[in-house]
Image (cartoon, rainbow, N blue to C red):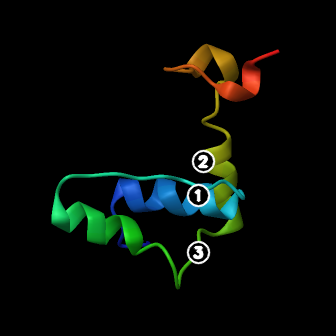
Amino acid sequence: QYSKDPAQILVRWSLQRGFVPLPKSSQPERIISNGQVFGWSIEPTDMAKLDALDRGKEGAVTWNPVDVD
């Protein structure tokens, strides 16, 4: 539907949620791909599907500064 790779979808999701993603790569083709996230958007129904994947703290794989008291 979007003809984008998974990383592009996730970077775009972050932008549409108001986050500032900081993608990184040492591969030139990936750096270019990470920047190709403008000029299109994820449909609201697909955004909702991605949002539903969130498992909160139980799904965290690293420290989250939002959770610090």
**Circles 2 and 1: CB distance less than 8 Å?**
yes
Tell us which disc is closer to us: 2 or 1.
1
Q: Which mark is residue 54?
A: none
Residue 50: percent from left, percent from top: 60, 47
Along the viewing direction, whichever of 69 and 37 lies nearer the viewer = 69
Q: Which residue is mark 3?
A: 41
Disc 1 marks which amino acid? Trp
Q: Identify the image quadrant of the N terminus.
A: bottom left
Camera-nearest residue between 4 and 57: 57
Of mark 3 and mark 2, the one earlier in the sequence is 3
Q: What kind of element bears circle 1?
A: helix
On-image quarter of the C terminus: top right
- Mark 3, Cα crowd under 10 Å, few <14 / some 14-19 / many 20+, is some
Q: Residue furthest right?
A: 69
Q: Amino acid at mark 2?
A: Leu
Q: Residue at x 60, y 55 (%)?
A: 14
The answer to whether residue 34 is above or below residue 51 is below
**Which secondary structure, mark 2?**
helix
Percent coordinates x, y for residue 65 in the rendering? 68, 26
Mark 2 = which residue?
A: 50
Residue 46 in view of the camera: no
First in residue order: circle 3 vs circle 1: 1
Q: Residue at x 74, y 28 (%)?
A: 66
Amino acid type of disc 3? Ser
| Quadrant hosting residue 30 | bottom left
Residue under pointer 1: 13
Q: Which percent across, then down, holds residue 31?
A: 28, 64
